């Protein structure tokens, strides 16, 4: 298929993914904030747990929450589920178009693990499925009854997934799979737990029976998990634009710090929305700041003292570029995945190398994001030569 057609397919699915993803994230953030803002007031109707008054768009809203369910339900009850379902469907579509379709380019790195495209796709699918079943098993086990221990267990599960994926796929492939791993858990939480439990509560109510309060408690637990995982998963989903995240060789550590930064930020916002005294949650900000500084430090490029003394000729550089870069970065790429040079970066002359030196350092010297999937087998020595030449300008 033409690279032009694939690019448009990628863009359309990505656009849809952003639209429905914003809808899902928006409802998640809103309902958690709403839940935390509920207050007990005088003369509340029977069964009401709390109420909230809100103002938006020139109007006032009065919201009531029933802890289990009211005695009757209107026929126009709203269900918030399709945003989550469509976010996963479009996200998986992107995974297919971007990573499965071009597995040799974006997903596989022979220097990490030589795989056939079919093998990489099967491992990907099994990994995503296994993530949900392990997570769900942990939540249903005795561990799930203790919030703190459960949080640590889920944290360890995601770090373990990052470690495994980084030893199977390319750097960018590993990071996007951690995001897909977490995103799958979040989507199936909605599809397999939250909505089914809500339907059981509704059915029991309509049948004149008392709904099981445990159903609501479990749904709330999974909803809170989704809320805390949202910020980390957003970073992982855009990670392919930031090769430094995968350049350390310690993907699991980068992911761990991202989880702390995202989770800490979310916790601070949640407790602020609940109007808790800041003395109870102030610690979240310094913890988040320390984790962010640690992430910047871990991903910072490490200087190679040996580069300063290396002498590399223009001819050597052009040979390296011709072997590893020109197939994509030329006015008319010969690589089947591209109809135009990525990001309009053309590397056919020494002047081009000098002009795009900073990008080359980030993508191909300090990290191994380029060549994509290291299809051409670029060696560490060739990367060092490129770096030495760029630094000698």
Image: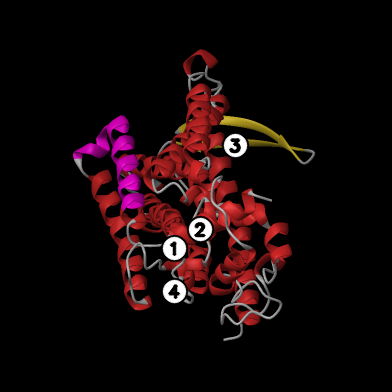
Helix, strand or loop at disc 3? strand
Q: Is tag 1's residue or tag 4's residue first in the polypeptide sequence?
A: 4
Report the magenta stretch's main SS. helix
- Residue 51 vs 213, above or below: the answer is above
Q: Split into 4 quadrants, where in the image is the N terminus?
A: bottom right
Q: Is tag 3's residue or tag 4's residue first in the polypeptide sequence?
A: 3
Question: Residue placed at 26% from the left, 39% from the top?
Answer: 144
Q: Is tag 1's residue or tag 3's residue first in the polypeptide sequence?
A: 3
Residue closer to the observer: 253 or 335? 335
Circle 4 packing at 10 Å, graded few (<14), some (14-19), many (20+), is many
Question: Residue placed at 27% from the left, 32% from the top?
Answer: 149
Kindly report the distance in space between the C-alpha atoms of the residues bearing marks 1 and 3.
Answer: 62 Å
Q: Which residue is mark 4?
A: 104
Q: Which residue is mark 2?
A: 383
Query: Are the residues at dot 1 and dot 4 in contact (C-beta closer than 8 Å)?
Result: no
Query: Are the residues at dot 1 and dot 2 in contact (C-beta closer than 8 Å)?
Result: yes
Boundaries of the magenta span: 142-163
Q: Which label was assigned to residue 63?
A: 3
Q: Between tags 3 and 2, which lies in front?
A: 2
């Amino acid at each position: 298929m033409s690279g032009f057609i694939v690019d448009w397919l990628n863009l359309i699915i990505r656009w849809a993914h952003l639209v429905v993803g914003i809808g899902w994230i928006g409802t998640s953030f809103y309902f958690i904030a709403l839940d935390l803002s509920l207050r007990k007031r005088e003369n509340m109707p029977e069964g009401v747990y709390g109420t909230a008054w809100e103002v938006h768009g020139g109007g006032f809203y009065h919201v009531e929450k029933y802890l289990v369910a009211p005695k009757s339900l209107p026929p126009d009850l709203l269900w918030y589920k399709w945003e989550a379902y469509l976010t996963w469907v479009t996200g998986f579509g992107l995974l297919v178009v971007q990573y499965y379709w071009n597995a040799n380019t974006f997903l596989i790195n022979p220097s990490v693990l030589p795989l056939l495209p079919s093998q990489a796709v099967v491992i990907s699918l099994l990994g995503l499925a296994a993530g949900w079943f392990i997570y769900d098993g942990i939540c249903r086990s005795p561990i799930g009854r203790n919030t703190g221990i459960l949080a640590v267990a889920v944290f360890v599960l995601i770090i373990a997934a990052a470690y495994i994926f980084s030893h199977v796929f390319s750097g960018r492939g590993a990071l996007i799979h951690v995001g897909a791993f977490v995103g799958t858990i979040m989507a199936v939480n909605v599809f397999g737990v939250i909505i089914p439990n809500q339907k059981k509560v509704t059915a029991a109510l309509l049948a004149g029976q008392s709904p099981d309060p445990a159903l609501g408690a479990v749904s709330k637990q999974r909803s809170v998990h989704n809320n805390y995982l949202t910020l980390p998963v957003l970073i992982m989903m855009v990670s392919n634009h930031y090769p430094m995240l995968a350049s350390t060789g310690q993907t699991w550590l980068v992911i761990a710090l991202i989880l702390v930064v995202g989770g800490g930020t979310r916790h601070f916002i949640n407790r602020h929305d609940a109007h808790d005294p800041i003395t109870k949650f102030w610690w979240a900000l310094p913890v988040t700041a320390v984790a962010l500084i640690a992430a910047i430090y871990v991903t910072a490029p490490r200087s190679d003292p040996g580069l300063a003394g290396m002498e590399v000729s223009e001819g050597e550089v052009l040979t390296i570029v011709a072997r590893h870069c020109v197939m994509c970065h030329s006015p008319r790429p010969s690589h089947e995945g591209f109809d135009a040079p990525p990001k309009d970066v053309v590397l056919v002359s020494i002047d081009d190398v000098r002009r795009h030196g900073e990008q080359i350092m980030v993508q191909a010297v300090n990290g191994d994001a380029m060549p994509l999937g290291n299809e051409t087998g670029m060696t560490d020595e060739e990367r060092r030569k490129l770096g030495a030449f760029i630094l000698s300008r």
